[in-house]
Image: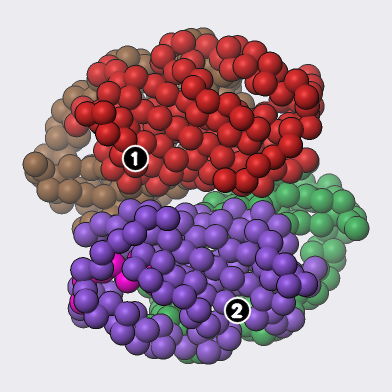
Chain colours: A red, B brown, C green, D purple
Amino acid sequence: MKTFEPRDPDWEARCRAKVDLQPIMRTLGIELTGLEPGFCEMRMPFRADLTQQHGFFHAGMVTTLADNAGGFAGYTLMPAGSEVLAVEFKVNLMSPAKGEAMIARARVLKPGRTLTVVSVEVSMLDGGVEKDCAVMQQTLICLPSS
Amino acid sequence: MKTFEPRDPDWEARCRAKVDLQPIMRTLGIELTGLEPGFCEMRMPFRADLTQQHGFFHAGMVTTLADNAGGFAGYTLMPAGSEVLAVEFKVNLMSPAKGEAMIARARVLKPGRTLTVVSVEVSMLDGGVEKDCAVMQQTLICLPSS
Amino acid sequence: MKTFEPRDPDWEARCRAKVDLQPIMRTLGIELTGLEPGFCEMRMPFRADLTQQHGFFHAGMVTTLADNAGGFAGYTLMPAGSEVLAVEFKVNLMSPAKGEAMIARARVLKPGRTLTVVSVEVSMLDGGVEKDCAVMQQTLICLPSS
Amino acid sequence: MKTFEPRDPDWEARCRAKVDLQPIMRTLGIELTGLEPGFCEMRMPFRADLTQQHGFFHAGMVTTLADNAGGFAGYTLMPAGSEVLAVEFKVNLMSPAKGEAMIARARVLKPGRTLTVVSVEVSMLDGGVEKDCAVMQQTLICLPSS
């Protein structure tokens, strides 16, 4: 994993405040469980009411957690007074999202003034064992605050 | 739009039954609003508790609706006694997901015995006017029922 | 297909000059066969020395043609004195790239000041009949000329 | 990096023979420089006649090398008498492809009976220093030999 020097000395407070502004975090029970420059980990406990027809987390939930973690991994390296938006992402679903909890770990591959590329790994805690579930490649854009 | 001949004469009942088996449909308020061979439309009314920090639908919700519609567009063309799973998808987010409701329209580009490729367009109803929001390319796999 | 109003009245001459600046066009025998605001078509005759192990065009060649057409579809709508670069793309390969010639048709879905989203369809002329081969979703960035 | 046990004891000879069957390898000067179970490295020296308008390798060449390496990384783990095809891939271009040579390193993330997911990193040797250039996520399908 690469190490990055954040441009904003107050990056951590800025990111944590922004995470808390997202209503979807509370609605879906997503927790921020790790934050470093260029890195973010989020977790989401299993909920049977967010599953598809086989009783696994819907792929949209896998994407929600991955996109969320990816956005904040990138946001740690953005300047004060900026906003982050996902421009696009691509998800490969490697095994069913079943288990007690889902974990997304996002790492910045390439930070940029305008665009940032992030890689996210999603795993499931299933019977206490962590198993690969999905991978995402994501592009973020850094916008001035409005 | 291409027209397709479904292999299963009972495709519609099979698909509608499967849609109803997904708990996430009710939890998020997703409605099936169109179903033809190779086509599926789903809608989801806006909910402020599923937004990100700017008050727009989270990109994960855009993906949830698109992936869901895409999966059932493909499933219309699969044989009786089969299951459908998304293998991968890619989403380009073109404008903020704001408005009264989100609409996803999915069209099969290439049905296959094993893999099916689907294109999905997502729009937002905003002040009664429909605006492009996102596009998805998706790959589905057809599995024998277990 | 959407219609677009180019920002640069001299868009066509600017695009055609840029196409000619690409050495890869001549090396691979790619021809520009259509250019309108927000649209570009390119063709490439089959060459046995650019195939993979089954005698079909390598997927990298499919991507080369699609990316090239996509870039110029977007470039038609960019201002004078700008440069275009592909930021990312995603390709679904739907059937083998075999036949006499490959055709890529690119259409802008969403032009933007910074980012432009393009959809590209690739087909093969095989025995005089055109068959779908691949689809691409692509993101371009508009940069000031350096 | 994960370690994998190949199913075919003769995996290496099978893969090397298949690589040599691809005419595009010689045409573009691509060399196989590393092969292990679940891993493949390929290199391609810079060629000015395969560049875009800025004198960098065209993104299609980046994709050609990445897709090729990815396909063989997956093929190492497939059974005797099988064929490999790329189903889809997605590329994020992180910096210009300039320098003396391009290197693609592909690692299998998830091998499967039907589908295999691969991650590929592409770098450029530029003044003797290796720099990140692009990343790919790729899906392969394993087919019985025809």
Type of amino acid at the residue the image marks with label 1: Cys
- The range drawn in magenta is D72-80
Q: Residue at x 54, y 51 (%)?
A: C137
Residue located beneath label 2 in the image: D44
Q: Is residue C136 left or right of residue D142?
A: right
**In the image: residue D93, left or right of residue D79:** right
- Which residue in the protein does label 1 denote? A133
Q: Can the viewer see residue B31?
A: no
Q: Nearer the viewer, residue B140 or A18?
A: A18
Q: Looking at numbered disc 2 in the image, what kind of residue is underneath it? A: Met
Q: Quadrant of residue C95?
A: bottom left
* Quadrant where the C terminus of chain A is found in the figure: top right
Residue A70 position in % (x across, y down): 55, 34
Task: Quadrant for the N terminus of chain A, please.
Answer: top right
Between residue D89 and residue C119, name the one nearer to us. D89
Tally the numbered discs. 2
- Tell me if D136 is positioned left or right of D130 in this view: left
Element under disc 1: strand
Residue drawn 30% across the image and 30% down it: A125
Return the chain for callout 2. Answer: D
Q: Position of residue D75 (x, y in %)?
A: 33, 71
Secondary element at tag 2: strand
> Does D89 sit above or below residue A86?
below
Report in which chain the residue with disc 1 lies. Answer: A
Where residue D116 sits, quadrant-wise, is bottom left
The residues bearing labels 1 and 2 have C-alpha atoms spaced at a distance of 33 Å
x and y, in percent, of residue D84 in the image: 32, 71
**Dividing the picture into quarters, in which one does residue A123 lie?**
top left
Question: Can you give x and y, in whole percent of width and height, for residue B74 in the image?
Answer: 28, 45
Look at 58% across and 26% down and name the residue there.
A35
